[in-house]
Amino acid sequence: MAARAGLLLRALPLLLWGGLGARPPGRAGRELRREAEAFLERYGYLSEQAPGAPSSTRLSNAIREFQWVAQLPISGVLDPATLHQMTLPRCGVADTDGQAARTERVSALFAGRRAKMRRKKRFAKQGNKWYKQHLSYRLVNWPQHLPEPAVRGAVRAAFQLWSNVSALEFWEAPATGPADIRLTFYQGDHNDGLSNAFDGPGGALAHAFLPRRGEAHFDRDERWSLSRRRGRNLFVVLAHEIGHTLGLAHSPAPRALMAPYYKRLGRDALLSWDDVLAVQSLYGKPQGGSVATQLPGKLFTDFEAWDPHRSQGRRSETQGPKYCHSSFDAITVDRQRRLYVFQGSHYWEVGADGNVSGPHPLQERWAGLPPHIEAAAVSLENGDFFFFKGSRCWRFRGREPVWGSPQLCRAGGLPRHPDAALFFPPLSRLVLFKGARYYVLAPGGLQVEPYYPRGLQDWGGVPEEVSGALPQPDGSVIFFRDDRYWRLDQPTRRVTASGRWAAELPWMGCWHVNSGGALF
């Protein structure tokens, strides 16, 4: 952390100057250049350059490579944005395949399948791979300020993330037996070499060794957290470093989990197409030959709230619908009080008595509707279904599309990638929620009413980034996010109750119909 902070502090007087080019401004510039060179050497950029080239050319080319990997404008100059990027927390594994990955990525745009076959080599050449598909792991220790059950849950989910999309299977080894992969938290120098010594909060958060050493090390002094609102999210770092232990190098793809700078959790799937292709090139596809449905990143934002004593090993017939154990993309209710829950390319219907039917393919009822829709609502006046994804929206009356083709909703001021949709009876209008704001739509669903959007504080106590909203017969509104719900009282416009929807709302279809007990 001290080295990174020093680099940033010495850079501040130069930011107004515009960065370092061929003429560094005095002693401060020379020191800053040396520290930048050390950074580029540490992460493999200078070592990729031709040894006989002039030092200025090698440095400029290394900066260009780093800027490309970091998704920055490529100038070959130590400009303010590049200097700032060098100070950000990241993975401690070197980015040694930058130029090759860049060349193969560009080639793939023109060479199609042949380029895809070549890019497999990128992931196998450094650490080869495990020559078996059943791997054991052990969590050796964990940060003292985090509960052990929650950390173990995060580790288990991180391994499951990779097994979902490949032929790999993982199991936790006993504490006294051998393990293929070991996860350990260290302080400072831990006999991995001075370049791998941990430096407290910031800097390199973790590093890992490719097969077959099978180790991942994490900075014990980092401000680790298993919540979205504070500290450094441990789950993302675990999943990234586990990818290295499987043989994956850093990815140049935008929003890839295996990018050098750790991915932020959001609504999109945690693994990008590049991550999936990389692990499948080494270990093959899951059993059955298809990729399992990926879960959105927001599902993994609060491991501290998970119940470590959740019952295990129930028979599949008592498990209830899949959405009860994970999350859903969207939810809505029709005029007959039938609930519709959407996840991936399927949906479930839940009657007023809590009985569930499904999953049903989306295409069987709403032809042309894409998977992973982001918001849905039913007009309680005419029964039309409205769906939203990205900048497009669909409207169906029964099984027939009203608009004929998807509409470009942003033309009317609607937000892209909305969090949730709601038909709000007091206004007889559709309402869209996005982050900390909401939008009231004019009749027809394609135009935002004047004076909107407004802040979410109008819905007293409702959190940001909700995943669904349902009007209730008594006038209240139920909001959902992850495994939680909030009930908004209509007269006071304040949240009056909250809890876990799978356990406390029997009409969600998650209660075991034979025992009457909650699944969670």
Image: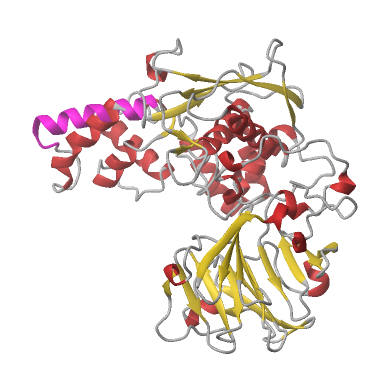
347 vs 152, left or right, is right
Tell me which residue sits at (34%, 30%) in the image: 40
Q: Quadrant of residue 366?
A: bottom right
Looking at the image, residue 343 lies above or below residue 169: below
Q: Is residue 135 visible?
A: yes
Q: Is residue 54 visible?
A: no
Looking at the image, residue 444 lies above or below residue 310: below
Looking at the image, residue 333 lies above or below residue 20: below
The range drawn in magenta is 24-42
Tell me which residue sits at (55%, 37%) in the image: 235
Q: Quadrant of residue 367?
A: bottom right
**In terms of secondary structure, what is the magenta stretch mainly?**
helix
Nearest the eye: 202 or 212 = 202
Residue 327 in the magenta stretch? The answer is: no
Tell me which residue sits at (80%, 70%) in the image: 352
Nearest the eye: 19 or 329 = 329
State the scheme by which the image is colored: secondary structure
Nearest the eye: 205 or 153 = 153
64 vs 291, left or right, is left
Residue 331, position in %: x, y?
68, 67
469 vs 18, left or right, is right
- Across the whole image, how many numbered discs are drawn on residues? 0
Residue 29 in the magenta stretch? The answer is: yes
